[in-house]
């Protein structure tokens, strides 16, 4: 029996195990779930050991633990470092879920649960691929190291220091990450570029305490009004960000790359329906694909202040707040962008308020080589499993660790994702297409075989 046949014969068990994993509410951003984070790490460790990985340990960090594993089969074979994360986003708002977020439910060919696609389902693909090698041929064709963290959804504060202090332990030839999507159920894709991220929280303070709006309204500048005006001014009428210096280091798209991006299948009406909007909006002169994957953006993720409970309260608030995220393209520094937006907001704010900007977290973007042997192995693995060649695309989201791997370990990352664009990541009703769970295991098996065969190219 070969690994692919083994996978076919154990599908039901693989899915049942994934459901067990998804039942653990490993929400890294909420303190009440800290015991669940420990439970998820132990569950993952135990299943790696059961899959045949000989060395699997839980390594503590200042935050949530890292599950590290290694299977060293041959000092002359290439080494693949598998990265993933076992933490998940909060499930709120609960009332919008069709099913319970931590009670996995099959509806048709989809598995609904928080973390189903991001990233427990995709992480577990690799565990089952390793099991298939162990149970059929005894070992994978390459050396394996696994780095599974529990802080990705809260900015990975412990990850970069961990990597920097364990360079020798994590030494490898290539990283593989399954935390991205393909274009459709039958349309594989390889992401070769990621955007970075700068995330800040803005606090405006006017009066030292809330005031009666009937007595002071019209004579005291309302911080919510000010914040609204500041935010409205962060884009011009053409959708371009107005922060001075924001575009200074933006790597412009070449004509050749714009041609390649234009080849990506895109149905505007379907896209509008998926987003539940009637029209697109954005930076003038760029297509929807370019705006969402290859251009920097600025979005307000939350805004609050004053009285928001039921009923009326005539208050002029002391403070107003907003959370703002900026997706960055390669060559943009998140530290610099955070400094620029801080200076800009403080410079344009009227003297009636004070502005405080807190740097919540950030990460660099990355561009990955498309001509490496490992990339070719990924290309061939997708093609063999899906029956059609993958499309190269850029990703609008951020996986900051990819840049850390480049800078600290000096290695490239292969984005071997199996999610779908409508998987509702970070939203109610997150799902994972079950056939893609099985196809993912097959693709990873083929990829690892391909990396082993391409050694020396």
Image (spheres, rainbow, N blue to C red):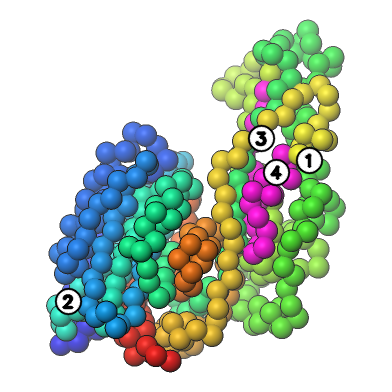
In this view, the mark in front (3 or 4):
4
Magenta stretch holds residue 344: no
Residue displayed at 42% across by 47% down:
158
Residue to which mark 3 is pinned:
357
What numbered label is drawn on residue 339?
Answer: 4
Alpha-carbon span between mark 1 and mark 4? 9 Å
What secondary structure is found at the residue carrying circle 2?
Answer: helix
Alpha-carbon span between mark 3 and mark 1? 11 Å
Q: Residues within 10 Å of mark 2 (few under 14, many from 20)?
A: some
Looking at the rendering, which quadrant does residue 54 occupy? bottom left
Alpha-carbon span between mark 2 and mark 3? 51 Å
Residue to which mark 2 is pinned:
134
Q: Residues within 10 Å of mark 4 (few under 14, many from 20)?
A: some
Q: Nearer the viewer, residue 327 or 210?
A: 327
Q: Which mark sits nearer the N-terminus, 3 or 1?
A: 1
Q: Which mark sits nearer the N-terminus, 4 or 2?
A: 2
């Amino acid at each position: 029996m070969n690994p692919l046949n083994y996978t076919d014969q154990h599908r039901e068990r693989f899915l049942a195990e994934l459901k067990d994993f998804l039942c653990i509410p490993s929400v890294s951003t909420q303190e009440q779930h800290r015991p669940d984070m420990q439970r998820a790490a132990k569950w993952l460790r135990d299943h790696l050991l059961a899959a045949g990985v000989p060395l699997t340990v839980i390594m503590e960090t200042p935050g949530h633990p890292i599950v590290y594993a290694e299977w060293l089969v041959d000092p002359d074979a290439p080494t693949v470092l598998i990265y993933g994360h076992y933490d998940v986003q909060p499930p709120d708002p609960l009332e919008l879920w069709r099913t319970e977020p931590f009670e996995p439910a099959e509806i048709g060919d989809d598995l609904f649960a928080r973390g189903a696609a991001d990233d427990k389902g995709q992480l577990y693909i690799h565990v089952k691929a390793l099991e298939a090698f162990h149970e059929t041929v005894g070992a994978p064709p390459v050396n394996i190291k696994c780095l599974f963290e529990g802080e990705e959804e809260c900015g990975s504060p412990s990850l970069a220091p961990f990597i920097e202090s364990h360079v020798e332990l994590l030494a490898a030839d290539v990283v593989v990450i399954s935390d991205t999507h393909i274009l459709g159920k039958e349309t594989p894709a390889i992401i070769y570029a990621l955007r970075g991220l700068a995330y800040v929280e803005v606090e405006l303070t006017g009066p030292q305490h809330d005031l009666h709006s009937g007595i002071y309204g019209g004579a005291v500048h309302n911080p919510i009004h000010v914040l609204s005006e500041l935010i409205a001014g962060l884009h011009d009428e053409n959708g371009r960000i107005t922060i001075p210096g924001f575009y200074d280091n933006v790597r412009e798209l070449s004509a050749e790359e714009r041609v390649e991006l234009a080849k990506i299948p895109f149905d505007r009406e379907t896209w509008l329906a998926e987003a539940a909007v009637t029209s697109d909006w954005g930076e003038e002169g760029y297509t929807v694909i370019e705006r969402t994957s290859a251009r920097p953006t600025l979005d307000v993720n939350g805004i609050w202040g004053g009285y928001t409970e039921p009923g009326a309260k005539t208050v002029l608030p002391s403070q107003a707040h907003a959370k703002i995220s900026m997706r960055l393209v390669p060559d943009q520094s998140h530290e610099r962008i955070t400094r620029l937006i801080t200076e800009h907001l403080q410079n344009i704010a009227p003297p009636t308020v004070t502005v405080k900007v807190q740097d919540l977290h950030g990460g660099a973007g990355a561009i990955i080589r498309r001509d490496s042997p490992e990339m070719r192995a990924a290309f061939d693995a997708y093609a063999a499993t899906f029956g059609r060649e993958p499309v190269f695309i850029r990703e609008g989201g951020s996986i900051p660790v990819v840049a850390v791997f480049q800078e600290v370990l000096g290695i490239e990352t292969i984005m071997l994702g199996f999610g779908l664009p409508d998987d509702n990541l970070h939203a109610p009703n997150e799902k994972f297409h079950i056939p893609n769970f099985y196809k993912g295991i097959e693709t990873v098996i083929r990829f690892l075989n391909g990396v082993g065969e391409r050694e020396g190219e």
